[in-house]
Image (cartoon, rainbow, N blue to C red):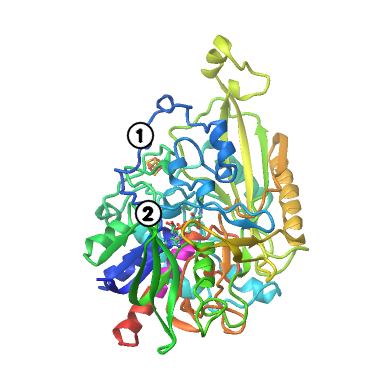
């Protein structure tokens, strides 16, 4: 009863993909998920609510904030989405240096609440870390992963335009969401002033026009409501719940077990392989063992680190596969600290129709194919234009009949920009297990010891200078900028700790995402990342997962395991 062909730990973005691919290829697959079940549509309690149907108009109460100071900082967190995030007190960890670890523990993981930006990595992002000496060589390059990007894009549905730019390769796109008039102006104007800077329509996991395979998943066109993080009854954006998990279930090969906290992977000293995983039932706290020939770890980057660090044996006293103290090190993230905003005059006779759930993207223009800055790495800039109401201004009426009246009138257009910067993977940025503190399931707490460096400071400075210059040159006024100095983690793109590489002495995983030292364990979530690039990472995790499953199933069918 407890034996399967494959076990997948975690049912979020990458785990959902592992489950789909394994089940489609005929393997009896167990997905272990620590959180509760979330059924598509049925378990989206706020999806169709209007603002006045919420007790606090969608806002979080002061008491909730005081009780949850960490998670209530997350982007998109509100009264309408709180049920898809953890509560701080339930899931403690130790911050050696400040690190905001944002989590969503349920079937579907953070796929329910992600922002859905899905650009491909460029070849430059794969090769720059080794070339410019701020990382090790990736064991794969863009051409190795490109067909798998296509495989994922076609299935989940990515909208976007084929823009033909080096920094952000084109994919298999559904039609893009339109720019609004100011975004179109900004794109044209920036292009005319800076030939190498491209403001393009967002590449987003959003069904602008569903294709047959998405209709077969039971999904339909996005309605442009921009309420995605509540869960979408139309399946208009990609989540495991709307897409990969029901698809896997249809094969008859999936067993999904919620409330199953994976404690560790069990290593078989005789065979030199993993034979299963130990689970603590989240509700009863009873221990159970599950066995399989293939194990995929997709518990999200830091949880996968935790599970491996906690998987000790005679052969691996410091965590599974960890012969050289690499496990838990080279944790990296995206630098999201800086943002800018400015007002643009004109366009007073123009407005928008509907809500655009995507954002425009200014593709990276720094250190592309040659190092041209005093810092390493590049940054993607998310941007967009919006029109305020008269009440949106500081001097406008704030209360009463005047306020209501002002609501009916439109204000000015504004443009915002914010950065998503590459960071340097460093051995000193690491996670490890607490020696004396445990969680409610008897698992050691994770300690985070991660921080910014000088390179991050220089990149923030460059973003602030460049955003000011660009916005002013295209005719904006009232420029404002902000360096939030937020702790790492709030970017929600934590990566590394179990990095891929060519050399088993400096990396944990080989080019197929197998642990060098325990080949039937695959890690394909953010923990596997050798470096961060500057693109949103999740679609790369999906592509790496599909690629790794193809390898695992090949080996399985050859009888290797
Ligand atoms: C507000 C927000 C906006 C974001 N925007 C974007 C974006 O625009 N683009 C982008 O690329 N990324 C974005 N991200 C990041 C994205 O959500 C993650 O990169 C992605 O979900 C990672 O996938 P995963 O499968 O590794 O982890 P998750 O989706 O988090 O899934 C991991 C699952 O494992 C389960 N789990 C954890 N530990 C255990 C255990 N011990 N035993 C059993 N199960 C366990 C968890 O409960 C969870 O369900 C955003 C995230 C947030 C929160
Ligand atoms: S914008 Fe689209 S995907 Fe988001 S909630 Fe609305 S219909 Fe669903």
Quadrant in the picture for the N terminus: bottom left
Instruction: Give the labeled residue for mark 1.
Output: 48
**Quadrant position of residue 507:** bottom right
Residue plotted at (52% across, 60% down): 537
Question: Where ligand 2 lies, by image quadrant?
Answer: top left
Give residue 77's position: percent from left, percent from top: 51, 41
Residue sticking out furthest to the bottom: 270
Q: Position of residue 289 (x, y in %)?
A: 35, 71
183 is higher (above) or lower (below) than 4: above
Above or below, 362 against 224 in this view is below
Say the numbered circle drawn on residue 62.
none
Outermost residue, top side: 401
Local secondary structure at mark 1: loop
On residue 283, the disc is: 2
Q: CA distance from mark 2 to mark 1?
A: 30 Å
Pinpoint residue 331: horizontal percent, then vertical percent: 62, 66
Q: Quadrant of residue 548?
A: bottom left
Q: Is residue 301 magenta?
A: no
Q: Which residues are magenta?
A: 539-548
If the image is split into quadrants, where does the C terminus sit?
bottom left
Secondary structure predominantly adopted by residues drawn in magenta: helix
């Amino acid at each position: 009863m407890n034996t399967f062909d494959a076990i997948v730990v975690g049912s979020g973005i990458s785990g959902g993909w592992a489950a789909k691919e394994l089940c489609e290829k005929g393997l009896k697959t167990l997905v272990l998920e620590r959180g509760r079940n979330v059924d598509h549509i049925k378990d989206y309690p706020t999806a169709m609510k209007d603002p006045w149907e919420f007790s606090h108009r969608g806002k979080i109460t002061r008491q909730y904030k005081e009780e949850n100071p960490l998670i209530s900082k997350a982007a998109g967190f509100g009264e309408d989405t709180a049920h898809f995030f953890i509560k701080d007190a339930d899931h403690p960890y130790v911050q050696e240096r400040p690190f905001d670890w944002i989590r969503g523990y349920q079937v579907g993981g953070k796929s329910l609440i992600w922002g859905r930006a899905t650009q491909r990595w460029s070849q430059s992002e794969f090769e720059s870390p080794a070339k410019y000496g701020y990382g090790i060589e990736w064991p794969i390059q863009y051409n190795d992963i490109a067909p798998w990007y296509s495989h994922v894009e076609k299935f989940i549905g990515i909208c976007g335009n084929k823009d033909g730019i080096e920094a952000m390769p084109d994919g298999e796109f559904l039609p893009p969401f339109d720019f609004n008039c100011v975004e179109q102006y900004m794109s044209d104007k920036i292009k005319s002033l800076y030939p190498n800077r491209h403001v393009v329509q967002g590449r987003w996991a959003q069904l602008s026009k569903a294709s047959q395979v998405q209709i077969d998943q039971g999904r339909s066109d996005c309605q442009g409501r921009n309420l995605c993080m509540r869960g979408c009854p139309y399946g208009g954006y990609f989540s495991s719940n709307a897409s990969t998990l029901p698809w896997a279930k249809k094969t008859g090969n999936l067993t999904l077990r919620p409330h199953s906290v994976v404690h560790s992977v069990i290593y078989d000293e005789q065979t030199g392989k993993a034979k299963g995983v130990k689970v603590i039932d989240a509700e009863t706290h009873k221990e159970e063992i599950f066995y399989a020939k293939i194990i995929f770890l997709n518990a999200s980057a830091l949880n996968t680190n935790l599970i491996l660090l906690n998987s000790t044996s005679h052969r691996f006293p410091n965590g599974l596969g960890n012969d050289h103290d690499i496990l838990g090190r080279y944790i990296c993230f995206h630098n999201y600290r800086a943002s800018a905003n400015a007002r643009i005059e004109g366009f007073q006779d123009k407005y928008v129709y509907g809500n655009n759930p995507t954002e425009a993207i200014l593709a990276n223009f720094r250190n592309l194919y040659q190092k041209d800055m005093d810092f390493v790495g590049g940054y993607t800039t998310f941007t967009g234009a919006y029109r305020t109401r008269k009440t949106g201004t500081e001097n406008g009426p704030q209360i009463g009949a005047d306020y209501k009246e002002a609501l009916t009138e439109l204000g000015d257009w504004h443009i915002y920009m914010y950065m998503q910067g590459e960071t340097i993977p460093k051995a000193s940025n690491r996670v490890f297990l607490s020696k004396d503190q445990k969680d409610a399931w008897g698992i050691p707490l994770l300690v985070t010891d991660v921080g910014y460096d000088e390179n991050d400071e220089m990149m923030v400075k460059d973003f602030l200078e460049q955003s000011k210059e660009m916005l002013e040159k295209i005719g904006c006024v009232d420029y404002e900028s902000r360096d939030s100095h937020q702790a790492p983690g709030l970017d929600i793109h934590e990566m590394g700790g179990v990095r891929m590489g060519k050399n088993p002495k400096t990396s944990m995983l080989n080019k197929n995402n197998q642990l060098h030292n325990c080949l039937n364990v695959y890690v394909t979530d953010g923990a596997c990342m050798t470096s961060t690039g500057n693109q949103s990472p999740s679609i790369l995790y999906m592509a790496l997962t599909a690629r790794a499953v193809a390898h695992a199933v090949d080996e399985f069918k050859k009888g290797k395991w």
